[in-house]
Amino acid sequence: MAFSLSGLARAASRFLVVPSLLSTLTTPRLDPNNLPIPPNNQLNITHQWSQLDFNYPSNDTRDSAIESGNFIPENVIPFGIDVWEDRIFVTLPKLREGIPATLASVSRLSDSFSPMLDPYPNWDFYNDRPGCLSMISVFRVATDPCGRLWVLDSGKVNVAFNITEVCPPQLFIFDLYDDRLLRRYVFPEKQALVDNFFNNIVVDYQGDCQDVYAYMADTERYNLLVYSYKNRTSWRISHGSFYPDPMKFNYQLDDLKWYWNYGLSGLALGPMLKAHERMLYYHATTSYKEFVVPTSVLKNPAAINESNDKFVLLGERGYSRSHAGGSAISRSGVLFYALPEHHVAACWDTNNTEFSSLQQGVIGVEKRKLAFPNDVKVDHEKNQSVWILSNNLHMYLFGKINPQAANYIILRANTETAVKKTVCSPTYNMFRKRPYSNTTVNYETTSVRMEAETVEPSTSPLRSTTITVTTTTTTTTTTAATTRSTPTTATNRGASTTASTTTTPTTTTTERSRLGNLLETAGRMLEDCRDLPIGPDGLRPCDVIDRSRNTVNRMLANSPIGDVLNNGALENAVGNMTNNPISNAVNNTINLIRNNPISNAIGNIAINPIRNIANNNPFRNRFRGIFG
């Protein structure tokens, strides 16, 4: 059995953490049968609806729309959101018939808790613009700090049953100061492949309102499209990490079971690291994995084929049924994301070196409010907020919506207060570094493929729905946009991508022989505690151990043994343990197990009865089902 100083620290951590520290280092676990309360539950409902309704010019117009089937209230479902100043934008994709407008807005300052939707930009845009000159079916939108709304139109209708492509995928860009259409861009056939499904978009702004890029996910064909606002061109990137995980196709929520094999969908841009560099965090819908890639790679189509090693696997979320929904990142670098199958809004600090279940925090968990958290956004305000849309999508598609219940809910929380007392808090981990600064690819990927094509304006606004990859007929209509100075609400945080690393000294055979028996005992305990039942606070004993390791490291750093360990002299460290507070925990391991307050709190565990406690506990099967 091999030993290391990190193993010693993990073993010692079991006995050193006092109860007062546990409250600040623990976060709720994902137990859908016994949902805990987050340590700093700040998610507040801003809007909610049983059914969505539109603000028609008159009651007669509304009645006429219902009579003709143009408006079927029970078929309208919100899918994505974004926020700009006092407005909340809500996407309404045409999953079924009877959706008169695919994009709408509501006021943050509305007196009504369930306000009517105002079609965006107005009713005339849907009534007076023929064919594909209007927006068809929008799943998600994105705002940028320059006051623009980027709308990704899938062009697909009846998505829930008999999907039909009415128009090719296209991008609409609006000026949010006067709601004027600035640009319409139709993606070339060689990029928008047959059976495509574009359902997410993020906008990469780095200080110049003209030199902006958009990244768009093709969930069905597993591609990422990149669009340059300045150059009016786009290109397609394909990579193995965009594919769904074939072992994670099964979903389950509220007694409903279904099968999805969707690829790339979750997109979130990290904060500014240096000039012209940000990181794009992404995941497939049908996957537990999270990946990252520098945006400089995506913005350089000429070198994309030599950049396969830049697409990096961060890790797995670690929970069973941890398919993630929408995601977004705050300026401080906290990734917020949804776990629909657990009714959870979660977080992870991108400054952390570890991406695992132990480093995933929970900012909200409630079956009613977060029935199916589908989209997550962070606004551009100076004091940022995270916004979450819960839409009961599983009941809409596979069950039945209760017209008397609050089915569609928008929630909001301040990004800083939401993560307090969770592992996502900047104060939680004192030894943070960027996970992508010193990592290698450990995910088997296909080769990167790219096609770049400049799209010239055309006189025809339409493209045949019979797509061939050899012919491209596309349209770009533009209106001159006024260049604005950078808004004061846009904050660029400069940081270096080079992270400091700590070298851990290795032990020799002689040193291991001195500590062998002790560490073997501690190691067995750490392994065996994986079978222990969940405690009343929703935690496993191992969670307490693992979450306390940073506290132990801080204790080591401020103690005589810590100084010795940092110098790599384990020989002297063992001698210095005699009068060190850590030595009591290390040298009296077995006694501390039986008498330590932590041990008593988690079940008075000793090595021999561990498995008996686990096997005889009624919660054991539920525990294993949840945490795998």
Image (tube, helix red, strand yellow):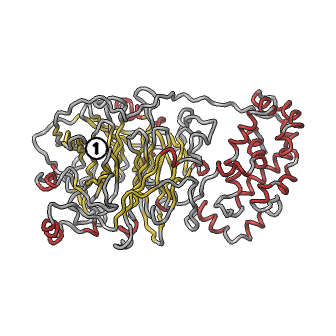
Q: What residue type is labelled 1?
A: Trp
Which is nearer the eye, 241 or 267?
267
Q: Please, is residue 493 above or below residue 71 in the view? A: above
Q: Report the residue at 68% width, 58% height from top.
A: 540
Q: Report the residue at 67% width, 67% height from top.
A: 620
Q: Report the residue at 81% width, 46% height from top.
A: 519
Q: In which quarter of the image is residue 92?
A: bottom left
What residue sits right under mark 1 in the picture?
Answer: 150
Q: Please, is residue 133 above or below residue 4 in the view? A: below
Q: Please, is residue 298 above or below residue 602 in the view? A: above
The crowding category of the residue bearing disc 1, from other C-alpha atoms within 10 Å (few below 14, some 14 to 19, many at least 20), is many
Please say whether residue 565 is visible from this viewpoint.
yes
**Residue, far front:** 111
Indicate the position of residue 451 as horizontal and vertical percent values.
31, 37
Report whether 33 appears left or right of 70: right
Q: Quadrant of residue 425?
A: top right
Indicate the position of residue 616 as horizontal and vertical percent values.
74, 71
Label 1: state its secondary structure.
Answer: strand
Report whether 198 appears left or right of 10: left
Report whether 183 appears left or right of 255: left
Report whether 132 appears left or right of 322: left
Indicate the position of residue 613 as horizontal and vertical percent values.
76, 66
State the count of labels: 1
Which is nearer the eye, 101 or 260?
101
Indicate the position of residue 219 as horizontal and vertical percent values.
36, 52
